[in-house]
Image (cartoon, rainbow, N blue to C red):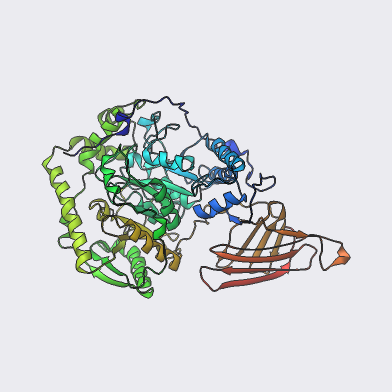
């Protein structure tokens, strides 16, 4: 019997103080509140530099623990970017609502850090996170981006939501999504159309497109999505992110508005693989309210982070799935990026062989979404007391959904799990998985590779997005991770370059192996490029500038901030708590003026600067540790902008 149990139906009722969320873009008062003019400095034995843009969880955690930045400052930084770019400027429209309690939660976490300086805290403590709007939150509506559920506040958190709260994550807010997760272009009746930050005329992928666009645009440190057929991996591909779909039922689905429980999984979208692993460590495990997660007891490693090692590609064998590489001439543009990535793998010591699956079109025809959606959603609504409608039919009759969903909702209402076709599809999933595993075993493969989606995102507001390869993982139950593979060609007639994702597909419960392969790939290639054209860094007011006509160095002593930019170099703004100030310079005729100096290094940049402010020559050295050859020395006099 195909049965699923919902948490709301089994837990005893609990009293909650439910808060209706409202957009709070004005909370910043029009200022960049993150400048370190009067920060609360926490005790720290070391000076830890901090770069807000593109910061990872572990980098942010280290800066928080050292007192370089506070959680309140972090939240204000992200809210400043959301205020500037989400509903104004490029109007990415990634957020469907902000959390009115985020700043208060951040202050409470900062107070705990001050009061308990020796307390051991996990890496997510005080880290800003965004949630896709199908994750239950007791303190905000959970709507699946549908007008029909606009006032629906769940009685408690989804299991994954609760685990993140327990880890100390701060929820910035909820992200827009393709309504009910029933599509891959991220358009909805409640949230409207989310845009791709790399090309504002195109969609960001879906259904977790709000999370994908928001994380790529640096609206939070990391974000949560769901994947029924590509909805984590496709937005990861289109937004130069990495996203993992775990083995089916490995992670709890409790408290996530369902599309198809047979295919639904939840998980993170991140700018790098380490962030994925950190979130997986915080959220993995057995959930009694989702009995299918019993499989996790024997199949969850002690830590996914421990799987992250370089050099895993040397000697590895991959199968390039030709069945899903080029199926129409329009697929070739993306296929060229994947073929180049295959060559990169070979250059890193891997073997790549071509693979085809016999009778692929038929053996892969195993989707059960249309058969399960109505029944699964009805069960969720029945277990959610505050839901204004109790069945999909009621929602359909209300008309409170995006018109583009009319066809899929009609189909879902016409199908159910008693259909013999449904039973055949469930059996077909087993056969599909066996065919994929057989191909891997017969060819001694570590993983299959293929494009996450074979075509660029189409122009908004169209919803008929072609090219998805979502079914390879979603309809077999096997895990797959989408990694940054590169970009389409620059600025041709098709518009700006668009990110392209490549998937590694593995056997059941090999998430650790996939993360290791993805980490090795990421560290060797560094293909991610932020969408700076449309959502650039919000910079402080610089006091001094040093330029030689090629490179430019910026300095803000009051905030202990520096930045260097040059062709091929963009450090973004760093807070350097080790910045030194001396009132001694070589040009004494002009009187004593400050000389600012410092040196720091993280995983990407090594910077050293010595900046007199009396007109004497400044010297700034930068080394790009990712490339091993991006060294630049800048000299010149500091001027005021």
**Where does the N terminus fall, quadrant-wise?**
top left
User: Is residue 134 shown to the viewer in this render?
Assistant: no
Which quadrant holds residue 277? bottom left
Q: Is residue 123 left or right of residue 592?
A: left
Compared to 415, does 311 lie above or below?
below
Residue 152 percent across, percent down from the top left: 38, 29
Residue 445 falls in image quadrant: bottom left
Q: Is residue 488 left or right of residue 541?
A: left
- Residue 45 point in image, percent of width and height: 64, 54
Furthest toward the right, the residue is 589
**Which residue is found at the position 40% from the left and 28% from the top?**
151
Residue 305 at x, y percent in the picture: 42, 56
User: Dividing the picture into quarters, in which one does residue 117 lie?
Assistant: top right
Relative to 477, residue 377 above or below: above
Residue 391 drawn at (x, y percent): 27, 29
Residue most extreme to the left: 420
Closer to us: 390 or 63: 63
Q: Residue at x 84, y 61 (%)?
A: 592
State the residue in front, 398 or 348: 348
């Amino acid at each position: 019997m195909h049965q699923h149990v919902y948490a709301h139906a089994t837990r005893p009722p609990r009293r909650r103080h439910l808060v209706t969320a409202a957009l709070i873009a004005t909370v910043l008062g029009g200022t960049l509140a993150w400048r370190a003019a009067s920060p609360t400095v926490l005790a720290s034995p070391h000076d830890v530099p901090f770069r807000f843009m593109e910061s990872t969880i572990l980098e942010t955690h280290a800066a928080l623990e050292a007192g370089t930045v506070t959680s309140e400052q972090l939240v204000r930084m992200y809210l400043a970017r959301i205020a500037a770019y989400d509903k104004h400027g490029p109007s990415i429209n990634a957020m469907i609502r902000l959390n009115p309690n985020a700043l208060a939660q951040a202050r409470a976490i900062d107070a705990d850090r001050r009061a308990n300086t020796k307390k051991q805290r996990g890496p997510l403590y005080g880290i800003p996170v965004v949630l896709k709007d199908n994750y239950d939150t007791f303190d905000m509506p959970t709507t699946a981006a549908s007008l029909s559920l606009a006032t629906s506040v769940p009685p408690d958190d989804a299991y994954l939501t609760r685990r993140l709260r327990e880890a100390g994550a701060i929820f910035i807010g909820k992200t827009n999504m393709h309504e009910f997760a029933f599509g891959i272009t991220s358009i909805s009746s409640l949230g409207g159309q989310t845009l791709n930050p790399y090309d504002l005329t195109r969609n960001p992928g879906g259904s977790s497109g709000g999370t994908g666009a928001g994380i790529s645009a640096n609206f939070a440190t990391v974000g949560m999505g769901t994947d029924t057929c590509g909805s984590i991996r496709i937005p990861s591909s289109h937004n130069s992110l990495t996203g993992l779909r775990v083995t089916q039922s490995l992670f709890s689905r409790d408290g996530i508005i369902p599309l198809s429980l047979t295919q639904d999984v939840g998980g993170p979208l991140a700018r790098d693989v380490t962030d994925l692993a950190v979130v997986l460590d915080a959220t993995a495990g057995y959930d009694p309210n989702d009995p299918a997660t019993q499989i996790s007891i024997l199949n969850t490693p002690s830590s996914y982070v421990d799987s992250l090692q370089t050099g895993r590609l040397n000697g590895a064998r991959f199968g390039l799935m030709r069945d899903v590489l080029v199926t129409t001439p329009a697929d070739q543009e993306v296929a060229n990026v994947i073929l180049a990535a295959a060559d990169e793998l070979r250059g890193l010591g891997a073997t790549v062989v071509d693979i085809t699956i016999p009778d692929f079109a038929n053996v892969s025809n195993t989707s059960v979404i249309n058969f399960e959606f109505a029944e699964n959603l009805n069960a969720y609504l029945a277990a959610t007391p505050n839901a204004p409608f109790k069945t999909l039919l009621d929602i359909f009759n209300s008309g409170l959904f995006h018109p583009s969903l009319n066809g899929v909702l009609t189909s879902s209402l016409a199908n159910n799990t008693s259909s013999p076709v449904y039973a055949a599809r469930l059996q077909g999933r087993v056969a599909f998985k066996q065919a994929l595993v057989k191909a891997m075993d017969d060819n001694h493969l570590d993983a299959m590779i293929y494009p996450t989606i074979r075509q660029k995102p189409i122009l908004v507001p169209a919803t008929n997005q072609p090219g998805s390869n979502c079914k390879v993982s979603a309809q077999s139950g096997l895990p797959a991770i989408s990694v940054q593979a590169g970009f389409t060609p620059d600025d041709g007639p098709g518009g700006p370059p668009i990110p392209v994702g490549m998937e590694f597909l593995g056997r059941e419960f090999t998430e650790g192996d996939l993360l290791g392969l993805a980490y090795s790939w990421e560290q060797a290639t560094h293909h991610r490029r932020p969408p700076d054209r449309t959502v650039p860094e919000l910079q402080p007011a610089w006091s001094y500038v040093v330029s030689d006509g090629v490179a430019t160095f910026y300095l803000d002593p009051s905030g202990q901030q520096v930045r260097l930019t040059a062709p091929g170099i963009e450090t973004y703004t760093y807070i350097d708590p080790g910045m030194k100030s001396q009132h001694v310079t070589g040009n004494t005729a002009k009187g004593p003026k400050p000389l600012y100096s410092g040196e720091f290094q993280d995983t990407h940049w090594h910077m050293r600067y010595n900046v007199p402010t009396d007109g004497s020559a400044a010297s700034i050295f930068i080394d790009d540790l990712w490339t091993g050859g991006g060294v630049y020395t800048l000299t010149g006099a500091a001027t005021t902008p």
